Amino acid sequence: MYYKVKVGISNRHIHLTEETYNKLFDEPISKRNDLNQIGQFASNQTVDIINGNKVINNVRIVGPFRKYNQVEISKSDAINLELNPPVRTSGDLENSETITLRTNKDEIKLPSSCIIANRHVHFNTRDVEKYHIKDKEKLKIHILGEKRGTIEVFAKVSDDGYFELHLDTDDANAFLLGQDDEVILEIDD
């Protein structure tokens, strides 16, 4: 079966525990804008991410707080930071890269916290039967247009899922895709 799905381009960002956040900031986390994934938001707060003398400034924190600290970057960011993070699903941080976070208040080194996020399509748990999919199932995305192609993605099923393809900026740029462009999701019956 084939379905149209909108593209969500995921720029570098950070998920933090409340404990880590409080070490970096004196003020409560505040919402800049809601994201499509239900209950998630881009905060007003940003941090600098550091590896040695390499820095990327003003990386956005995404809320709400999580049970783990995770920094998601693209391969281009990794090259600039001289890191080699693994490509992983969210929360799979074992043996991932160590990175340092800095704010005006403090600087914290986070071991095993930096990844390049797998390409994935978000599904709500209510959609599992509609699309006949399982969490972490491999799926195909067909990209039409000037730089067409087919890529493998994974299903990401959650209670707060909003039906959307998530690609990082490198993947989106490689296929000349913009935010909310439509691509074709193929699901085997």
Image (tube, rainbow, N blue to C red):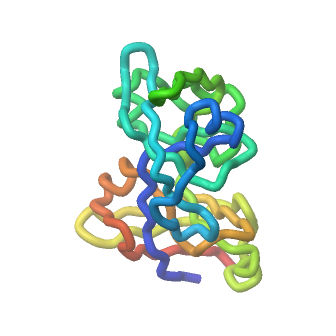
Q: Where is residue 46 in the image (x, y as percent from the top left)?
A: 45, 42
- Residue at 63 percent across and 42 percent down: it is 16
Q: Position of residue 152 (x, y in %)?
A: 53, 58
Residue visible at 53% across and 24% down in the picture? 106
Residue 184 x/y as whole percent: 46, 76
Q: Which of 125 and 150 is in front in this view?
A: 125
Residue extending furthest toward the bottom? 130
Nearest the eye: 150 or 70: 70
Displayed quadrant of residue 140: bottom right
Residue visible at 42% across and 59% down?
Answer: 9
Q: Residue furthest left?
A: 146
**Left or right of residue 168: residue 64:** right
Image position, residue 108 (x, y; %): 58, 23
Q: Which of 16 and 184 is in front in this view?
A: 16
Quadrant where the image shows the N terminus = bottom right
Q: Is residue 63 above or below residue 132?
A: above
Q: How many marks?
A: 0
- Is residue 55 found left or right of 155 in the rendered image? left
Q: Quadrant of residue 155?
A: bottom right
- The quadrant in which the C terminus is found is bottom right
Residue at the extreme front of the image, as rendered: 26
Residue 4 drawn above or below residue 155 = below
Q: Which residue is drawn at 38% across and 73% down?
A: 180
